[in-house]
Amino acid sequence: MTEAVPSYLSPTGQEIVFLLLGAVAVGSALLVVTTRQLVHAALWLVVCFGALAGGYLVLTAEFVAWVQVLIYVGAVVVLMLFGIMLTRAPIGRSADLDSGNRVASAVVAVATAAVLVTVVIDGFRTAYTPLRPGAGAAKELGASVFATWVLPFEALSVLLLAALVGAIVLSRTDIPGGSPPRSRTEKDQTSGRPASNAPPDSIPDKPSPSTPDGTTSGPTGDNPPPDQTGGH
């Protein structure tokens, strides 16, 4: 005798909480990509990640929920906020955050969501798994990762290591292939100042003060310097 599958028209309390958390996650994700304040986008991202962690708790995946909070909320978002503050990025409203492609991005997002929802509903229409406490604990997940999924786990670790090494190589200047260091002359030309190592003749002279009759005084003018010996 098979167990009766509950109907979607009579949701349980866990399903209602899961739907509410999903609505909060979707709403905060929309605010992340639509706000014009960079700090507000990072804070709304915290709300989105918190709603996802709550969804994991409802699905009895406590370990994944705490990893979501500790790594994404406690490390990634905090790192983004520190990067914004240390680089002195604009904190207020910025029109540069709007690229002008809202219509195209909205069409792509809606089409992608429609495809994902269609595939999930078509593939898991009759599937039902009762929520049993303890299924998402660290013991079960560790046994599954390091026994059944150990090869994909190791492949992912090698991929992340390769990305880290590539980022180090691209950022170093003393390794062949990295960005060459800028010379002092290039920095002076970029800032609009004369090169500090240029010869003295290439540096323009300062304009000499002029006398009331329109002539230029000083060593650079047409008139000779006055006699310093005291003669007339």
Image (cartoon, helix red, strand yellow):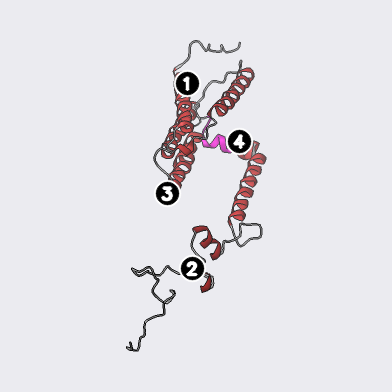
The rendered magenta stretch, by its main secondary structure, is classed as: helix
Q: Nearer the viewer, residue 107 or 217?
A: 217
The residue carrying mark 2 is: 204
Q: Are marks 4 and 3 in contact (CB under 8 Å)?
A: no
Q: Tell me the amino acid under the disc marked 1.
A: Leu
Return the mark for residue 88. Answer: 3
Of mark 2 and mark 3, the one earlier in the sequence is 3
Q: Kindly identify which residue carries mark 4.
A: 144
Pointer 1 residue: 19
x and y percentages locating residue 218 in the rendered image: 39, 75
Give percent across and percent down for residue 16: 45, 18
Mark earlier in primary sequence (4, 3): 3
Is 7 contained in the magenta span?
Answer: no
Residue 68 image position (x, y, % from top left): 49, 37
Whether residue 150 is situated above or below residue 211 in the rendered picture = above
Residue 5: quadrant of the picture: top right
What stretch of residues is rendered in magenta?
135-144
